[in-house]
């Protein structure tokens, strides 16, 4: 083959390679939720996120876990998927979880939403079972609050309120002004 023929086939191969590289072979559509999240440009993404905090005596005080965390640094709240909190507050342990969550930029407030459940467990006492749509825990004050309808079940007593404030330091709670309480009547067979 002459030099001109080699040059022709080399040029033809280069054009075919250029066309092959410029056109993607597979075209996929991006989920709109994922597109919105990535448009915000997160600083980090962590799967299987776990964070522990110890008190000054070295005892475990708080554990926060999540299926995943999208961190936006100081620009916006970090997003959590399936967050779970374990708060060791003597004499009780709190287990709090939801489907979604957010950590504010300074990491002092955890906001949980969608099917939030909180359980207070203490040896020898009826557990508290809280459920609602939102819950916020302020780590500086150790207050757990909600401004949505919240249900509290303690043994056979069931209370529903339009807001919630729990002070984890004193184990006192308030369900707001519009509270309905039901309890199971004791019968002679109980």
Image (spheres, helix red, strand yellow):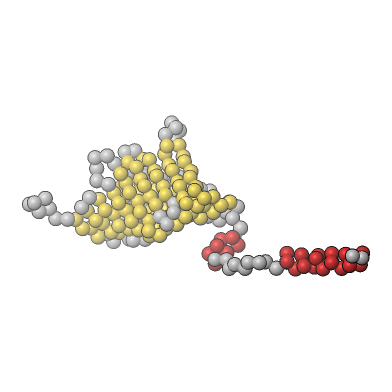
- Camera-side residue of 178 and 118: 118
| Residue 97, position as x, y percentages in the image | 39, 52
9 sits to left or right of 52: right
The quarter in which the N terminus is drawn is: bottom right
| Residue 110, position as x, y percentages in the image | 45, 51
| Residue 14, position as x, y percentages in the image | 81, 65
Q: Quadrant of residue 86?
A: top left
Give the residue displayed 54% in from the left and 66% down from the top. 31
Give the residue displayed 50% in from the left and 47% down from the top. 49
Is residue 176 at least partly visible in the picture?
Answer: no
Is residue 88 at least partly visible in the picture?
Answer: yes
- Camera-side residue of 118 and 17: 17
Q: Residue furthest top?
A: 57
Q: Quadrant of residue 12?
A: bottom right
Q: Residue furthest right?
A: 3
Q: Quadrant of residue 163?
A: bottom left
């Amino acid at each position: 083959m002459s030099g001109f023929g080699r040059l022709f086939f080399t040029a033809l191969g280069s054009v075919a390679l250029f066309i092959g590289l410029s056109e993607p072979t597979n075209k996929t559509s991006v989920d709109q939720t994922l597109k919105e999240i990535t448009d915000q440009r997160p600083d980090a993404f962590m799967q299987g996120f776990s964070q522990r905090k110890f008190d000054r005596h070295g005892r475990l005080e708080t554990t926060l876990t999540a299926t995943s965390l999208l961190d936006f640094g100081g620009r916006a709240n970090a997003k959590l998927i399936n967050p779970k909190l374990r708060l060791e507050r003597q004499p009780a342990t709190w287990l709090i979880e939801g489907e979604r969550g957010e950590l504010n930029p300074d990491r002092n407030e955890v906001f949980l939403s969608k099917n939030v459940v909180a359980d207070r467990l203490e040896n020898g006492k009826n557990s508290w079972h809280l459920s609602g749509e939102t819950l916020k825990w302020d780590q500086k004050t150790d207050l757990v609050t909600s401004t949505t309808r919240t249900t509290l079940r303690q043994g056979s007593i069931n209370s529903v309120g339009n807001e919630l404030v729990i002070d984890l330091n004193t184990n006192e709670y308030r369900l707001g002004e519009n509270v309905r309480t039901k309890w199971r009547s004791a019968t002679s067979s109980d």
